Image (tube, coloured by chain):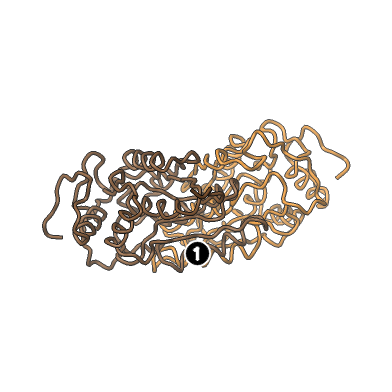
Chain colours: A orange, B brown
């Protein structure tokens, strides 16, 4: 087995996309994992998924970042109890109520601070643009612009690139890739609504279930409801 | 008096630069103030300065962001007890030990999240490039690059500019401007080392004291030591 010497920081929410992204990074890098608590409804369950995934990849370097200001700022159904989590409408082209303002920028900045200190040269993030919910901070041009910010805002000797290996993949493609790489999809959590059993009807559950359906495999996690209309 | 209708978010550390920046923004905007705790040695004292300044400007909208991950990540003498706060060497062109990796990016991202939700169109930050300590994330090109990130990473209807009104000013110019605008410099805190009386010998105290000396005015805050060698 080849000894991996280079370090990559991976942002791992605990969902499928970041789990598969970690599996991709794991091929070439030693991993350092960052997880963000941002006061989302399913914060505890996602943290458990994060730690389960980190244990699976035998990762020692991990950091939990507490961004509770995002829930105090509000503006998203994920963090603001006053805004309802919308039922899935996968044909709706508007930005959904679950959009957390500038969340990915908050995530990347903390990854960059960590990467600069531990000497990691890559940050992997499992953002998905196509087949996604239409969040503006998942667009390729957002990440390209962010690399310029890293280049100008860190020490001259620091060189960190942002890697978004699944940004143009569809959910079924991500699931297939995860299975091929042996990613622990059974440990992941995607539901925006519940922490015990996935609801099956929020945006995130709907995307996940439809993805597994298209691959023709049963999602290994438990659902309260598996709608047939997807 | 003209009624100000537009909102600006100002990042206020509690130091002189951000206090003067708030005074500048206050001419044209209603203020919303953001303060970052990042586990720095003088966190409590800076928070008091922030609240004193916010009270002075009669600001209701204020948010305290807790970035304790920055101290857990370490890598800076401001947050890492294992690294000594260096004595001032204002001719040293290297990046000083007090550099907190990517701190300004962390600050701006939280300001953007806040600005997007409350509908502010400008973010004011009191970064100083010339006559500064040489932090990479105080360079004009860093802020220019960040505006592109905001443009690509927020909702289409969100338009937020970053304003750095003192970036090319020297410390004496900032002090003079603050006095002209009636900024409450007596409420500010700059020392990196102490919380009771400013040490007078850290980078930040040295820059501040030298600034007042050049203006020919006595700094209104108390010092443990006012070195004559500046």
- Which one is in front, A106 or B197? B197
Task: Indicate the secondary structure of the residue bearing disc 1.
Answer: helix
User: Looking at the image, which residue is at 34% across and 57% down?
Assistant: B99
User: Looking at the image, which residue is at 68% across and 42% down?
Assistant: A190
Q: Position of residue B81 (x, y in %)?
A: 29, 45
Q: Is residue B223 above or below residue A9?
A: above
User: Looking at the image, which residue is at 72% across and 38% down?
Assistant: A85
- Which one is in front, A170 or B10? B10
In the rendered view, does A162 fall on the left or right side of A181?
A: left
In the rendered view, does A35 fall on the left or right side of B81?
A: right
Q: What is the crowding at mark 1: few (fewer than 14 residues within 10 Å), some, or many (at least 20)? A: many
User: Looking at the image, which residue is at 60% across and 46% down?
Assistant: B117
- Which one is in front, A39 or B141? B141
Residue at the outermost right position? A229
Q: Which residue is mark 1?
A: A149
In the rendered view, does B111 fall on the left or right side of A224?
A: left
Residue at the outermost front position? B1
Label 1: chain letter: A
Quadrant hosting residue B53: top left
Q: Position of residue A160 (x, y in %)?
A: 48, 64
On the question of residue B87 being in view, the answer is no
- Which one is in front, B112 or A12? B112
State how many labels appear. Answer: 1
On the question of residue B145 being in view, the answer is yes
Q: Position of residue A179 (x, y in %)?
A: 71, 52
Q: Quadrant of the C terminus of chain B?
A: bottom left
In the rendered view, does B79 fall on the left or right side of A144?
A: left
């Amino acid at each position: 087995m080849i000894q991996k010497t280079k370090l990559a920081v991976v942002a791992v929410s605990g969902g499928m996309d970041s789990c598969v992204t970690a599996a991709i990074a794991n091929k070439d890098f030693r991993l350092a994992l960052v997880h963000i608590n941002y006061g989302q409804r399913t914060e505890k369950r996602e943290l458990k998924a994060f730690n389960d995934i980190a244990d699976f990849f035998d990762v020692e370097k991990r950091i939990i970042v507490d961004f509770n200001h995002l829930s105090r700022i509000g503006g998203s159904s994920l963090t603001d109890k006053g805004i309802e989590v919308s039922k899935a409408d996968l044909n709706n082209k508007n930005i959904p109520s679950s959009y957390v303002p500038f969340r990915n920028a908050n995530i990347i900045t903390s990854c960059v601070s960590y990467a600069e200190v531990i000497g990691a040269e890559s940050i992997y993030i499992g953002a998905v643009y196509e087949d996604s919910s239409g969040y503006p901070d998942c667009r390729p041009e957002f990440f390209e612009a962010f690399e310029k910010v890293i280049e100008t805002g860190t020490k001259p000797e620091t060189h960190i690139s942002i890697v978004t290996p699944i940004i143009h993949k569809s959910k079924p493609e991500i699931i297939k890739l995860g299975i091929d790489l042996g990613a622990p999809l059974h440990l992941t959590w995607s539901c925006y609504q519940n922490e015990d059993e996935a609801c099956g009807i929020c945006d995130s559950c709907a995307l996940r279930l439809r993805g597994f359906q298209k691959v023709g495999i049963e999602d290994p996690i438990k659902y309260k409801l598996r709608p047939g209309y997807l």
